[in-house]
Image: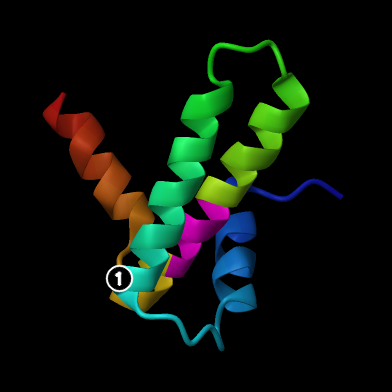
């Protein structure tokens, strides 16, 4: 069964429902995962890049949940301003 991206995002947020880390800790986690991506960015390791991208997106769901940010509206507003 195929899920829409927004449903998948909400499922990931729910998986983080009882996450106890602070916003600062989530930002540190996100920063470390982005640095890891930077390390392999010049390689052709699609599988590794996909895994790390998933980890980055999952960390972003933690952040959007903790900060109560509607990511659809946030992205829509940025696209409209471009």
Q: What span is in magenta?
A: 57-62
Does the rendering let one see residue 6? no
Left or right: residue 3 compared with residue 42: right
Q: How many marks?
A: 1
At mark 1, the secondary structure is: helix
Residue at position x 47%, y 68% in the image: 62
Q: Of 15 and 5, which appears nearest the observer?
A: 15
State yes or no: residue 58 in magenta. Answer: yes
**Where on the picture, by quarter, is residue 81?**
top left
Left or right: residue 26 compared with residue 46: left
Q: Position of residue 45 (x, y in %)?
A: 72, 18
* Mark 1 closeness class: few <14, some 14–19, many ≥20 residues within 10 Å: few
**Where on the picture, by quarter, is residue 27?**
bottom left
Q: Of 19 and 79, which appears nearest the observer?
A: 19
Residue lying farthest to the right in this orientation:
1
Residue at position x 45%, y 40% in the image: 34
Does the rendering let one see residue 35? yes
Q: Of 6 and 24, which appears nearest the observer?
A: 24
Q: Position of residue 57 (x, y in %)?
A: 52, 49
Residue at position x 65%, y 29% in the image: 49
Left or right: residue 7 compared with residue 36: right
| Residue of label 1 | 24
State yes or no: residue 67 in magenta. Answer: no
Position above or below: 18 against 10: below
Position above or below: 19 against 82: below
């Amino acid at each position: 069964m195929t899920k829409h991206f927004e449903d998948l995002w909400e499922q990931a947020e729910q998986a983080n429902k009882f996450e106890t880390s602070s916003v600062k800790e989530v930002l540190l986690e996100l920063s470390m995962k982005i640095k890891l991506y930077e390390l392999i960015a010049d390689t052709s390791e699609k599988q590794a890049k996909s895994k790390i991208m998933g980890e980055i997106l999952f960390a972003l769901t933690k952040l959007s949940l903790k900060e109560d940010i509607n990511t659809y509206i946030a992205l829509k507003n940025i696209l409209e301003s471009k």
